[in-house]
Image (spheres, rainbow, N blue to C red):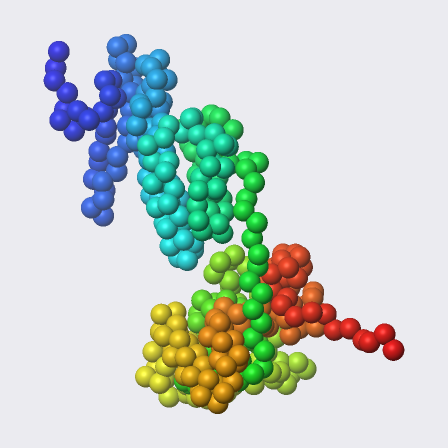
Amino acid sequence: MRPRNPDNRDLPINMYRHCRQRKNGTVWISYYYRGSDGKVIPLGRDLNKARLRWAELEAKEAPADLKTMQAIFDRYERDIIPYKAPRTQRDNKAELKQLRAVFDSAPIEAITPAMIAQYRDARSAKTRANREIALLSHVFNIAREWGLCEQANPCQGVRKNKEKPRDYYANDAVWKAVYAQACHELRDAMDLALLTGQRPADVLAMRRDDIVDGYLLVRQGKTDKKLRIQVEVDGEPNSLGKLVERINKGNAEYLSPFLVINRRGQRVSWPMLRNRWDDARESAAIKAAAAGEQELAVRIRQFQFRDIRPKAASEIRDLSDASVLLGHSTEGITKRVYRRVGAIAKPSK
């Protein structure tokens, strides 16, 4: 019997690897099966799927290493996570780290809803546990698509921990205190966030050339949803239009196309914004405490940049308008999570 090519010694019997170098230097790899009758059957380019198909052709059980959650997690992290938004990628990797510590060695078919519930109850971070179970559910659905799991998704029907939405509202006193201590670029970011109601990453991504035909064009990074926010009414700039004009005037000497830039003409990143925010907030809190306004100092220290988005939603009287501005598909989430002040009511008499 002729010995196998060294390139195929890591593969099961009768399974072979075909490699071809492309002109750009990358290597194209595919797998095929050749039985005792000499017939060649393509197995595709994915090694895990090829091994599963090999097991069917040989009438053998699938390789054991493909049945554990570690293999599923590895492939999910390699093939699925890189195509998500940057923030989601970071969150998913942190969530996978928690899931791996418990489920890595478990056979995928052995995981039950009771085990998922036990994981939920054992986690001290209850909100994070909900996110981790949601990710695990998606991992199971993808594994079913890959043919690596035949049982029903064990995460379905498992009760989630009750979550209480953040209820902090930055009133005018808090806003003015932090704004007074903010540097030029932080003030620009705060004003843009308040008038547009967008997430911090989307605010920092806004550019001068996003202003088209009287609208600020926004593409939300988290949802990929597109918005057109008015910057003028009847040919005259509205509050957002005047803000953009002010920002452009202040940035006129710089070449950067971004709206939020520092005094050296550099685009402000999230870590840069976070550092400036922390400094301004702390300076405002110290100043309030020195003036004897202890409660205001406490409220200032609780203020986060992400609270500007719900502040915007809370200060728009019409719920429908607030929901459209925030890019929500339904008004329910705007009302439940982002409206942090009560409805305006008239007295009985």
Q: Name the residue rendered at 53%, 70% in the picture.
A: 307
Query: Looking at the rendering, in which quadrant would you find the C terminus?
Result: bottom right
In this rendering, does residue 295 appear at all?
Answer: yes
Q: Is residue 192 above or below residue 137?
A: below
Q: Nearer the viewer, residue 88 or 244?
A: 88
| Residue found at the very far right of the displayed protein | 349
Is 153 in front, or is 278? Answer: 278
The location of residue 19, given as percent across then percent down, is 22, 33
Percent from the top left, x then y, of residue 218? 52, 67
**Res. 41 in view:** no
Q: Name which quarter of the figure residue 74 lies in.
A: top left
- Picture quadrant of residue 99: top left
Q: Position of residue 45 (x, y in %)?
A: 32, 33
The image shows residue 244 at horizontal and vertical percentages of 52, 82
Give the answer, above or below, for where 223 lies relative to 182: above
Q: Nearer the viewer, residue 12 or 234?
A: 12
Q: Viewed as shown, does residue 263 lie left or right of 27? A: right
